[in-house]
Image (cartoon, grey):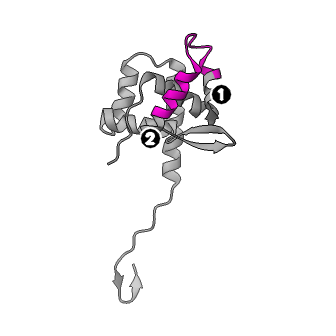
């Protein structure tokens, strides 16, 4: 399996910007990160994006003379990768770790319960193909 490298904290900040606003130029990413990181240089963002492209975390298109970067995977896909890498794919272990960490608010727990109920309902409404029975005397039974 071709595994995507784990982004560094700086690379993760850039990925978050790209996930939030979509494909962007170095200037757009820099302008959004600059208020949070006073000493951030434009060249640093540019260099990080080049490194991230080498690592296959992002890719770019060219519009005129401007490189427009986009992530190679979605935020949701990164969660699945994290789940597989850290919890061996066990969703219940991830959820239990979150609940045990006491970082989940009562409102978030209620949201989770609602989402679980909706997912359960959606799964129940999906029709499964009818089981075929053996033919006895030329008829389906």
Q: Tell me which residue sits at (61%, 27%) in the image.
A: 29
**In the image, which disc is placed on residue 57?**
none
Whole-percent x, y for residue 5 in the image: 37, 36
Farthest residue to the bottom: give it: 137
Q: Tell me which residue sits at (57%, 39%) in the image.
A: 70
Our reading of the magenta stretch's main secondary structure is: helix
Q: Is there any visible trace of residue 11 in the rendered image?
A: yes
- Local packing at callout 2 (Cα closer than 10 Å; few below 14, some 14-19, many 20+) is some
Q: Tell me which residue sits at (51%, 31%) in the image.
A: 49
Out of 81 and 8, give the one closest to the viewer. 8
Q: CA distance from mark 2 to mark 1?
A: 20 Å
> Magenta residues, as a range?
31-51
Total residue callouts? 2
Q: Is there any visible trace of residue 23 in the rendered image?
A: no
SS of the residue at dot 1? Answer: helix
Asked if residue 38 is among those painted magenta in the image, a careful observer would answer yes
Q: Tell me which residue sits at (47%, 27%) in the image.
A: 11
Q: Which residue is mark 1?
A: 28
Whole-percent x, y for residue 37 in the image: 56, 13
Whole-percent x, y for residue 67 in the image: 61, 38
Q: Which residue is mark 2?
A: 56
């Amino acid at each position: 399996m071709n595994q995507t490298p784990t982004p560094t904290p700086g690379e993760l900040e850039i990925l978050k910007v790209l996930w939030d606003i979509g494909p962007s130029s170095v200037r757009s990413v820099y302008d959004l990160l600059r208020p949070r990181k006073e000493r951030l240089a434009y060249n640093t963002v540019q260099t990080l994006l080049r490194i991230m492209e080498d690592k296959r975390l992002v890719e770019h298109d060219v519009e005129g003379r401007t490189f427009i970067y986009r992530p190679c995977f979605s935020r949701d896909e990164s969660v699945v990768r994290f789940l597989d890498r850290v919890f061996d794919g066990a969703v219940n272990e991830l959820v239990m770790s979150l609940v045990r960490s006491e970082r989940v608010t009562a409102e978030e727990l209620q949201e989770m319960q609602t989402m679980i109920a909706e997912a359960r309902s959606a799964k129940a409404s999906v029709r499964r193909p009818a089981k075929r029975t053996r033919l006895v005397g030329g008829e389906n039974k």
